[in-house]
Amino acid sequence: MNLIRAIQRLLKPAKGRPTFTSVRWLAVAVVVGALSGLGAVAFFSAVETGKFLILHKLAGLTLPAPAGEEIFKGPAGLFRPWIIPLFTTAVGLATGFLVMRLMPETMDSGTDGTDAMIKAFHRQGGLIRPLVPLVRGLAAVATIASGGSAGREGPISQLGAGVGSYVAQKLNLSVRERRLLLLAGAAGGLGAIFRAPLGGALTAVEVIYREDFEAEAILPAVLSSVTAYSLFTLFFGTDPIFGIPSFDFHDVRELVFYAVLALACTAVGWMYVKAFFFIKHSVFFRIRDRLGLMWATGLGGLLMGLTGAAFPEVLSGGYGWLELAIKGEVPLMMMCLIILAKTMATSVTIGSGMSGGMFAPTLFVGGMCGGVVGQTAHDLFPDIVTQPGGYVLVGMAAFYAGVANAAIGPLIMVCELTQGYGLLAPLMLASALCIILGRRFSLYEHQVENKFESPAHAEDATINILEQLRVKDFCKFGRVTILEEGTTLKALTDIIANTNELYFPVKDRSGTMTGIVSIHNVRNVLFERSLFELLVVGELAAKPASLTPEDDLYTALLKFVDTDYGQIPVVSPDDPNEILGLINREDVFTAYAAAIKEVREENNGRAEAAG
């Protein structure tokens, strides 16, 4: 709390609510990144400790671990595979019970923690109850540690988003700033847990849309991600997750095989998404509606445990198996079996309502797709495809890009994982093809097309609406009091006394409009009798301004802002000196408010229909 108060003092000027500058964004983003980084450290430590105790010691399994994540070493316990379904079932029952008792509103939060973060950004004004990421995070630790087929990235992005939302609420920031900090927190969690600060930041700001990204969030997201990554590496080092050789693209003929890889990833991605949503909605939702969430998650845990006991390759995140595939140590048929088994295991784990992320399983399936294509191409054309392991890395990025509609973040992540850009060309090609071919399906239920489809940018859409409205529909046509430049101040006082108008167009002797007189600007001299015969209207007039009936209201709004006039003359499009009437500033603002209300009602109706 002392830290929050210190940031509040930094943000708050002498009077008024906080206003942001680049320096202030730096301070807040660093705080959010530091808290997200600490959360990532605690989460990662808990998961790895739990896996070592449950899977290695109690169940007696020796699962491969990637070089950058092998924290614990020691002899395995007695082989007791029945431990796995015992623990996963218990975790499923406990997760369902806690969710129903403490936060039932999260039962329909979407695919995983990342999707819940997306929903909070679009639909909840950036608000996340602190209890939600804490309970979901602890449940995810138990799920992954016991062998559930789920990843760390979804829960940690939700945990980081919760940190950003909490800090924004404590600082009394606006809804817009709260949403940006929510993304900054998610970026911090992703950048830390994946040890890819740039990729984590870019993934957070682009995954909320299918064909857009949140440009305003890039600066705080990068700052938060770098801070979280730096803190995470203080505990676990800077080595990347995978201990793999460097890969280089040097034969343009290989692009054909990378294009084939994109086709394979798209086909498997379609199967992956359809299977997940079928199992989730057609199986577990029906069980949940009939028996309750706890029994649905318990059944999911049981099915996952039985699958994992029989086929250990699908347990937890599976990064160790990915590293072996990159090194060419997983047989071709085994990779094909893993794709099917991992799809089913992830679907029953996350689809049943248990906590965990879809990110790691998605990378896992995509990597194995790449391994199948790369190994097959290497066997058929060994002179062209010399490094089949590179296809595993490209498959990871391309597959996730296709199912999540996120092209840049995963691509950068793979480059950070390999610590080089040797595979940049095939990464770009395969990711672009997967996004184009997989445009009709998405892994995340709350992802929207672009900013104009998001309630978070309802006000932005108002500009487009104002551009469709015309001045002629809001103008008051009729007689307008027009002043001549030579009219004296005495005559002006008489005119003002006999009219309700506050703004008067001014013309010269030739009939050309040369300015506008506002009663507010001349009120200080209106009763100076010594100036009655000395001052003339031409000396009191401000710059001219006018609109035509066919101008849109957005043009009118900008002109009102530029001149600060309360009324602007509307002139004939054929003769700029023929004044047809006046349009009031209040009329434009009323139309603006009505447009915002209409957009919000449409978005709310769409949200209710989707729910």
Image (cartoon, rainbow, N blue to C red):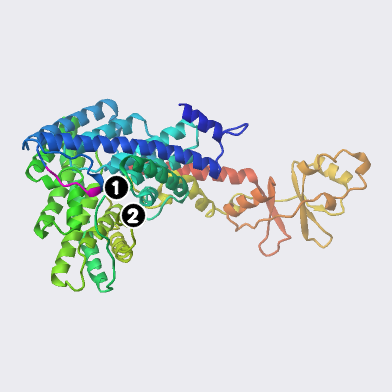
Dominant secondary structure (helix, strand or loop) of the stretch shown in magenta? loop
Residue nearer the viewer, 154 or 312: 312
Q: Is residue 491 visible?
A: yes
In the rendered structure, which amino acid carries the disc numbered 2? Glu
Q: Is residue 353 visible?
A: no
Q: For the residues marked 2 and 1, what is the alpha-carbon distance in whole angstroms? A: 24 Å
Crowd rating for badge 2 (residues with CA inside 10 Å; few <14, some 14–19, many 20+): some
Which mark is on residue 444?
1
Relative to 15, say whether 580 is above or below.
below
Residue nearer the viewer, 611 or 191: 191
**Residue 171 x, y percent position in the rendering:** 49, 32
Which mark is on residue 416?
2
- Name the side, left or right, on which 445 lies relative to 59: right
Give the mark count: 2
Which mark is on residue 151?
none
- Name the side, left or right, on which 327 lies relative to 492: left
**Residue 369 x, y percent position in the rendering:** 19, 58
Residue 426 colored in magenta in the image: no
Crowd rating for badge 1 (residues with CA inside 10 Å; few <14, some 14–19, many 20+): many
Label 1 residue SS: loop
Mark 2 vs mark 1: give the one in front. Answer: 2
Which comes before the other along the chain, label 2 or label 1?
Answer: 2
Image quarter of the N terminus: top left
x 56%, y 45%: residue: 591
Residue span colored magenta: 62-67
